[in-house]
Amino acid sequence: MQSEREIEFKNLLTQEEFDTLVTVFRLTSADFQTQTNYYFDTPDNYFKEKKMGFRLRVLPNRNELTLKTPVQQHVMEEKTVILSNDERDAIIHENRFPTVSFLEQIKDKDPLICIGSMQTNRAQIAYNKGVLFFDHSLYSRKEDFEVEYECGDVENGQKVFLQLLQEHHIPIRPTDKKIARLLKYNNSLEG
């Protein structure tokens, strides 16, 4: 199991802003990789209540089971286990999870359920001592565009990210994590 602190800054974009950044950073369709995230929780929202996120990420060459736990603003503790294709299929088709240490905290809870999935076309580049991600995400009948910056330092990372937005005349938009956006959209369909 890998465990790391993830420091990230994100901002939703219009399609035009996204296309402009893709052009500025000279990205092509070959730079983008498709990934699908499946999000899980208990029926009583164990993870949501603790502001945690639990997902299975399916990439072309690997599968990751990840639990994200908040540490402070912009900082998450991320624990990830790499899964085989058989383990991935057992989760998706049978809702059967492998034994993973970070799931021990919910072993006495109701079973995990898939609360939604999101497909993201993502490109990434090294940028100012960090990594810049360009995401075009599709979920239900919704799509959104996002730029995300991951780095090793909150203070410097915030400066770099805000400067990037300012340079490209992109307004700062409060941006929820992908799982929160997915849930918000799904709830709007129910309401």
Image (spheres, grey):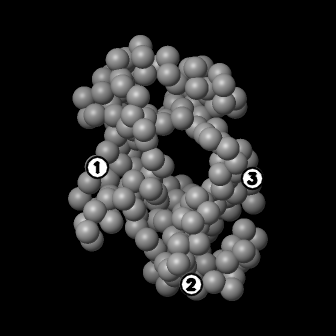
Task: Tell me the amino acid under the disc marked 3.
Answer: Ser
Q: Is residue 36 visible?
A: yes
Q: Nearer the viewer, mark 2 or mark 3?
A: 2
- Residue 52 rendering spot, x and y as whole percentages: 60, 60
- Residue 168 rendering spot, x and y as whole percentages: 37, 17
Direction from residue 183 to residue 96 in the image, left or right: right
Q: Which residue is mark 2?
A: 111
Task: Identify the residue shown where x is 42% and y is 16%.
Answer: 166
Task: Identify the residue shown where x is 54% and y is 55%.
Answer: 61
Q: Earlier in the sequence, mark 2 or mark 3?
A: 3
Q: Of the numbered discs in the image, which one, if any, rests on residue 3?
A: 3
Q: Earlier in the sequence, mark 1 or mark 3?
A: 3
Q: CA distance from mark 2 to mark 1?
A: 29 Å
- Secondary structure of the residue carrying tag 3 is strand
Direction from residue 168 to residue 45 in the image, left or right: right
How many residues crowd around disc 3 within 10 Å: few (fewer than 14), some, or many (20 or more)?
few
Q: How many marks?
A: 3
Residue 100: image quadrant is bottom right
Q: Quadrant of the C terminus?
A: bottom left
Query: Compared with residue 47, is residue 14 higher up or lower down, i.e. above or below?
Result: above
Q: CA distance from mark 2 to mark 3?
A: 24 Å
Q: CA distance from mark 1 to mark 3?
A: 30 Å
